[in-house]
Image: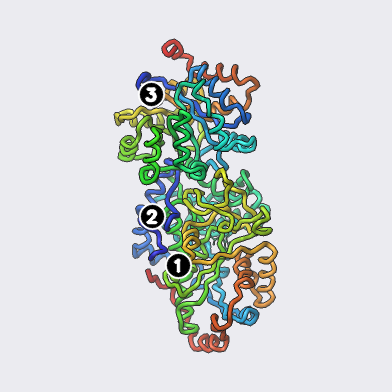
């Protein structure tokens, strides 16, 4: 069974998904970071495939992409690093990145290998729904891989419903009209938008991302969604970390403080 | 119309709209409305009024006699450099700002390489009283300082793009990020036939006035509508798309596209996309681009800021793929030489971008029998047809 399906079956609230860029801060930090995230209590791990031109990302993630590429990270190496990942990690793994590197790698080969490694799904911000349906859905589905779409405050209800219909794991609710890491905090306007999405009673669970950085924003997001996604704030933790294990544990614990007892 | 965009936004294998969901509403709105807006009578009237009285169209089609002599061919220069602000870019910015107004947008953003598109955008924003932010690679701001000054005088805010090679690609990334952050009030005036559908098609349509005029002017001057060749430089490819537009379906007209080879196609410092590129996704469209095996976009290089771009528009990728157009790559050095040569032969100092197109004449080895070289005949038509053609809309 796809591990994303499992998580959403078992857990209906306070799901924490954490993004990091593969190859950052160090080329070989991929597996250690994933292990610490799992041990610290993250529910889903999003592994970023670094790209030279991440147009939907703000400076923090842009810089982590640049640093990772400089360190020598690329898609082939990442897949090699993930070879034995399922010996240690049993929570869902989602690969996130821009579509061009995947296109160059070859869609079929990519899906095949991801399936073998135990990857559960993908987030490609620059692969819109129609392109996915026309050209790539078949390959993803054949290998049991879920594709995760984004929605934003500007996405019409009609389109949200269409995206819901074509989604098969969760919907990534982008919290504001912005690139990653641009805004901190959650305004009442944003909360109204979360409520609007919640009221649509979608068939897929929702996770809110962009601007989630601490316990307060995580909890606000969890009020109207099944959980939340942290990206830039976690990259900042990694950026300044001298001891990955301690810092990751402390950070995740600080975000999930209120829920600790319920989860473990 | 085998070279026109299809209803999914593709030119053959190339095109489409690979954009983040944050931009979907804006791009979809444009896709669903732009043709209708452009075809409205009021739009047409205002567009052509401004092209005539503000831009100064039609631009001359000038028989360059001494240049013709040199190459034993009859060579005409379509003088887009005489447009208000100094390049073809304003044909597109006038069109797009009228579309933006119709869509109720309050502010405009744009990317620029050489600064020509930035100036053309700042100009129409001043004309229409709209806020204007221009993203420009910090490297380009250095090498194109006068254009930065012009944009500022026109009231635009110029923001340096400091990532990557600090040139056009990076400015485009920053403009897209700005658009993601301000989707509702902002229209993004893309400056070439690049970006997600419908941009390539829309920009080509606005620039098609160039080939509209060429047809009429050739008819008036030498009694034939079709040249044997059309030569244009390609950065993203908007001037080339405009010059090719009404000739694309007529295979008797050979299309020649000229890219920047920088320090040489294989020097590692080049922007010759068709020579070095493979299919991938850049700035929202599937096209040919320079990239590593791993799918990372390669930093391009050209002396010319306007051609210093790692991709080309999807239309040009299609023209290349189907061999409808012939592509040449011209080095910095040869472009400089060709630019100086034109200056000394005709008293016309071309843009360094344009100089690349001129340098292709050296590589093409035109045969006199092909080119029907006859300045005398041309002069006769000039004197008998003094009236300039009207910029009519033949669409
Ligand atoms: C004079 C001139 N020609 C050509 C270009 C290249 O753009 P495009 O290929 O879109 O025509 C530029 C760009 O700045 C330019 O200023």
Q: Secondary structure at mark 3?
A: loop
**Measured Cα–Cα span from mark 2 to mark 1:** 25 Å
Parent chain of label 2? B
Q: Measuring from the top left, give residue A46's x and y in whole percent.
A: 49, 29
- Any mark on residue B7, and which? none
User: Which quadrant does ligand 1 occupy?
Assistant: bottom right
Comparing B377 with B85, the one in front is B377
User: Would you name the residue on which mark 1 appears?
Assistant: B245
Question: Tag 2's secondary structure?
Answer: helix
Q: Is residue A7 above or below residue B372?
A: above
Q: Residue at x 66, y 70 (%)?
A: B338
Q: Chain of mark 1?
A: B
Q: Quadrant of the C terminus of chain A?
A: top left
Instruction: Examine the rendered structure and indicate whether residue A12 appears above or below residue B37.
Output: above
Q: Residue at x 35, y 56 (%)?
A: B7
Residue placed under numbered mark 3 in the picture: A226
Q: Quadrant of the N terminus of chain A?
A: top left
Q: Is residue B383 visible?
A: yes
Which residue position is annotated with label 2?
Answer: B102
């Amino acid at each position: 069974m796809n591990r994303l399906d499992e998580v959403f079956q078992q857990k209906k609230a306070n799901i924490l998904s954490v993004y990091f860029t593969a190859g950052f801060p160090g080329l070989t930090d991929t597996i250690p970071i994933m292990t610490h995230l799992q041990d610290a209590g993250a529910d889903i791990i999003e592994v970023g495939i670094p790209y030279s031109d991440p147009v939907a990302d703000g400076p923090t993630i842009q810089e982590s992409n640049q640093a990772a590429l400089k360190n020598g990270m690329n898609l082939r190496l990442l897949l090699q690093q993930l070879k034995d990942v399922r010996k240690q990690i049993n929570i869902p793994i989602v690969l996130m990145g821009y579509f061009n590197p995947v296109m160059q790698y070859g869609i079929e080969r990519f899906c095949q290998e991801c399936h073998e490694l135990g990857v559960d799904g993908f987030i490609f911000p620059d692969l819109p729904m129609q392109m996915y349906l026309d050209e790539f859905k078949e390959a993803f589905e054949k290998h049991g891989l879920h594709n995760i779409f984004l929605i934003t405050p500007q996405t019409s209800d009609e389109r949200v419903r269409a995206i819901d219909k074509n989604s098969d794991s969760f919907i990534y609710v982008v919290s504001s009209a912005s690139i990653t890491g641009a805004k901190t905090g959650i305004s009442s306007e944003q909360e109204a938008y979360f409520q609007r999405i919640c009221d649509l009673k979608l068939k897929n669970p929702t996770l809110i991302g962009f601007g989630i950085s601490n316990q307060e924003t995580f909890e606000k997001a969890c009020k109207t969604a099944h959980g939340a996604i942290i990206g830039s704030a976690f990259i900042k933790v990694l950026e300044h970390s001298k001891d990955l294990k301690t810092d990751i544990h402390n950070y995740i614990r600080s975000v999930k403080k209120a829920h600790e007892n319920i989860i473990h | 119309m085998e070279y026109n965009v299809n209803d999914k936004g593709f030119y053959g294998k190339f095109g489409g709209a690979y954009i983040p969901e944050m931009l979907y509403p804006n791009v979809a709105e444009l896709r669903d409305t732009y043709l209708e807006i452009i075809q409205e009578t009021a739009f047409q009237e205002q567009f052509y009024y401004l092209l005539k009285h503000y831009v100064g169209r039609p631009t001359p089609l000038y028989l360059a006699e001494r240049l013709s002599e040199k190459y034993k061919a009859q060579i005409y220069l379509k003088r887009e450099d005489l447009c208000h602000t100094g390049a073809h870019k304003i044909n597109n910015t006038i069109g797009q700002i009228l579309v933006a107004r119709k869509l109720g947008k309050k502010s405009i953003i744009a990317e620029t390489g050489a600064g020509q598109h930035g100036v053309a955008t700042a100009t129409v924003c001043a004309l229409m009283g709209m806020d204007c932010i221009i993203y420009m690679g910090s490297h380009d701001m250095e090498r194109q300082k006068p254009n930065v000054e012009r944009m500022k005088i026109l009231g635009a805010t110029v923001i340096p793009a400091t990532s990557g090679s600090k040139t056009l690609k990076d400015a485009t990334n920053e403009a897209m990020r700005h658009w993601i952050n301000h989707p509702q009030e902002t229209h993004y005036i893309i400056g070439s036939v690049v970006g997600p559908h419908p941009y390539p098609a829309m920009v080509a349509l606005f620039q098609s006035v160039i080939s509209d005029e060429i047809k009429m002017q050739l008819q008036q001057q030498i009694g034939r509508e079709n040249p044997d060749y059309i030569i244009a430089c390609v950065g993203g490819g908007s001037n080339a798309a405009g010059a090719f537009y009404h000739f694309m379906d007529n295979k008797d007209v050979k299309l020649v596209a000229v890219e920047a080879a920088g320090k040489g196609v294989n020097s590692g410092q080049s922007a010759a996309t068709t020579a070095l590129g493979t299919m991938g996704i850049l700035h929202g469209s599937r096209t040919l681009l320079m990239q590593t095996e791993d799918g990372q976009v390669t930093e391009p290089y050209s002396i010319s800021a306007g051609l210093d771009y790692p991709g080309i528009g999807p239309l040009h990728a299609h023209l290349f793929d189907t061999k409808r157009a012939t592509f040449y790559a011209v080095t910095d050095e040869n472009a400089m030489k060709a630019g100086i040569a034109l200056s000394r032969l005709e008293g016309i100092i071309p843009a360094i971008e344009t100089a690349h197109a001129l340098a292709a004449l050296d590589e093409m080895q035109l045969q006199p029998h092909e080119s029907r070289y006859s300045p005398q005949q041309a002069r006769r038509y000039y004197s008998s047809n003094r009236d300039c053609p009207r910029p009519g809309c033949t669409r």
